[in-house]
Image: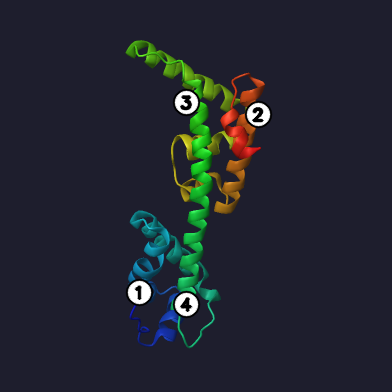
């Protein structure tokens, strides 16, 4: 069963005020439609409450930014918000799929490189430190932006928006940058004889 939805009283005027920067007007829009978008659009699409919350936040950040471009329709603002929310969810699903593949490939390389670790705690710690030094050594040979995006996205596990903001790029540009960075990492590993075959299949 779909959501029971009613327009905000004087919705057209509320939207106009919000577009002019009226914070309370925008809060009315948020309170009216955020719960519906969350429960009936984002959670069903994503199947994860945390991801749904992230997409909801990003939806309303985009709505706030682009509200001046909204063209009034008798159906009100909800269909516009719903389309935006679906697009955010699709973007997240696509990015999550690529991210998991990249993280898996990157992780396989790290696992392969660490395959000689012994069960002696002292030796394990030394070998982990040596592995990290080898990884950092490879990263140091890369374009600084490639090294930065790999550290943030795959080693520090920072989210896409955070990484994009830190690097001063759009999220779509970040995905391209990460893709190229992983290819560069693989080539650098092969050049140094470290072997990163796990990355080859995904990024060739």
Asked whether 18 or 117 is in front, the reply is 117
Q: Residue 47 carries which label?
A: none
Sequence-earlier tag: 4 or 1: 1
> Marks 1 and 3, Cα distance to the nearest angstrom?
52 Å
Position of 94 with respect to 129 (left or right) is right
Residue, disc 3? 111
Q: Which of 146 and 24 is in front in this view?
A: 146
Q: Is residue 100 above or below residue 195?
A: below
Mark 4 vs 2, N-terminal side: 4
Q: Name the residue under label 2.
A: 187
Residue 68 in percent (x, y) is at 53, 75
Where is residue 194, by image quadrant?
A: top right
Please tell me how many numbered marks the rendered image carries. 4
CB contact under 8 Å: marks 2 and 1: no
- Give the labeled residue for mark 1: 24
Q: Is residue 68 above or below residue 55?
A: below
């Amino acid at each position: 069963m779909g959501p029971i939805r009613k327009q905000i009283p004087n919705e057209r005027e509320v939207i106009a005020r919000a577009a002019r920067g009226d914070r309370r007007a925008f809060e009315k829009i948020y309170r009216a439609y955020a719960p519906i978008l969350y429960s009936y659009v984002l959670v069903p699409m994503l199947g994860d409450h945390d991801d749904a919350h992230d997409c909801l936040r990003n939806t309303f950040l985009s709505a706030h930014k682009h509200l001046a471009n909204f063209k009034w329709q008798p159906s009100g603002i909800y269909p516009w918000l719903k389309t935006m929310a679906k697009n955010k969810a699709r973007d997240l699903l696509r990015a999550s799929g690529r991210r998991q593949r990249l993280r898996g490939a990157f992780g396989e390389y790290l696992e392969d490189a660490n395959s000689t670790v012994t069960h002696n705690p002292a030796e394990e710690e030394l070998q982990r430190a040596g592995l990290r030094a080898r990884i950092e050594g490879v990263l140091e040979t890369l374009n600084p932006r490639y090294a930065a995006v790999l550290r943030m996205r795959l080693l520090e596990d920072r989210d896409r928006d955070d990484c994009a903001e830190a690097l001063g790029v759009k999220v779509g540009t970040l995905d391209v940058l990460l893709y190229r960075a992983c290819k560069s990492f693989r080539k650098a590993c092969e050049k140094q004889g470290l072997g990163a075959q796990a990355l080859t299949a995904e990024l060739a």
